[in-house]
Image (cartoon, rainbow, N blue to C red):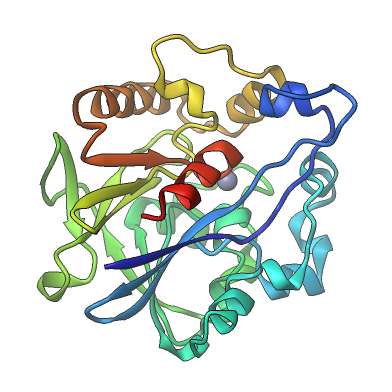
Amino acid sequence: MKVHHLNTGTMCPVGRRLVNGTGSLFQRARMVCHCLLVETNDGLALVDTGIGLGDIATPARLGRRWLRQTAPRLDPAETALEQVKALGYSPNDVRHVLLTHLDRDHAGGVPDFPHAKVHVHRAEYDMAVLGKPAAPEGRYITQQWQHGPSWQFYGEGGEDWFGFRGVRALGDREPDILMIPLAGHTPGHCGIAVRSAGTWLLHAGDSYFFHGQLEAKVRMPLVLGYFQRKADMDRKARIANQERLRALKLGHGARVTIFNSHDPVDYENCRCGAH
Ligand SMILES: [Zn+2]
C-alpha cells in the first residue's frame, strides 16, 4: 500500500532543549502531528487527523491552557483536508479515519471528512463521547464529533501481530491495517499498524513521546516528560506498553518501523525512509 506521512499540525512550545532534547533553551521547540494517508483496497484511509479547520476557525475551543503550552501554528495548509487536496485527491476519497485516540490534536480533522467511517476503540468512545466513565475535565473537545460521524468500534480481540493483538480495521478486503490496543495515555488508546512495501509501520500514537524512549537508555527531555506524565490516564499501563514496544523494536526492528505522533525525529526519519 502506498503511504504518505503528513504533519497535520506543528506545535512550537517554548524551551526547545527541554522538549526536543536538542538546541537552546531559548528557542521554540518543534512538535508535529504525524498522520498517515494510506491508499487501501477500500479507498483512502487517514490514520489520525491532527488539527482541523474547525479548530483553526475557533481556536478557543482547544482550550486556553493547551494553546499556551503547545503554541500550535494553526496553519490551514497543514490540515489533513488541505494536504489531501494538494496530493490531488478529493476529500470524499477518504473513506476511513482510524484514530489512535480522541484527544484534540488527533481528532481535530474528523469533521473535515464527514463521510468517512471513524474507527476507534470502544473504551475511548465510551469515555470521550458518552462520558462513561467521565473523562477528566477539559480532556476531550466534543465539538470535534458533534456532526455525528459513523463510528466503528474495536475491543481487545483480534489476531496475533508480533505478540500484540490486532483487529483488521477494514475487514478481510484489507488485511494490512490493524488496530492494536495500547492503553495508558487514554483507556482506549490504540496503535495502528499498516503494511507497506513488505514491511510494517506502527503508528504508536501517544504511547510514547520521545524516540529515545524505545532505546535502552533514555534521557527524557524534562518538559516533554512533564507533558507526558500530565497526559497519562494510566501511567503504569502506558509504561508497560512502552516496554512492549521497546522489545518489539529490539526483536523486529528490521520488519517494523515504530513511530509516535509528536516527535519530529520520528517524523523526519519516516519521511526520509519514504515508507
Ligand atoms: Zn497527542
Determine the image quadrant of residue 81: bottom right
**Residue 17 versus residue 108 in the image, above or below:** above
* Residue 131 appears in the rendering: no
Q: x and y percent of residue 147 in the render? A: 56, 82
**Residue 7 versus residue 52 in the image, above or below:** above
Q: What number of labels is visible?
A: 0
Q: x and y percent of residue 163 in the render? A: 14, 34
Q: Residue at x 37, y 64 (%)?
A: 3
Which of 229/251 is in front?
Answer: 251
**Residue 94 versus residue 45 in the image, above or below:** below
The C terminus is located in which quarter? bottom left
Which of 123/192 is in front?
Answer: 192
Q: Residue at x 58, y 43 (%)?
A: 262
Q: Is residue 250 left or right of residue 160?
A: right
Name of the residue lying farthest toward the top = 217
**Residue 171 versus residue 141 in the image, above or below:** below
The N terminus is located in which quarter? bottom left
Q: Is residue 264 left or right of residue 246?
A: right
* Residue 236 appears in the rendering: yes
Determine the image quadrant of residue 118: bottom left
Q: x and y percent of residue 37 in the render? A: 43, 68
Which of 113/29 is in front?
Answer: 29
Q: Is residue 184 left or right of residue 263?
A: left
Q: Residue at x 63, y 28 (%)?
A: 230
Q: Residue at x 59, y 52 (%)?
A: 33
Name of the residue lying farthest toward the right = 26
Q: x and y percent of residue 108 in the render? A: 61, 65
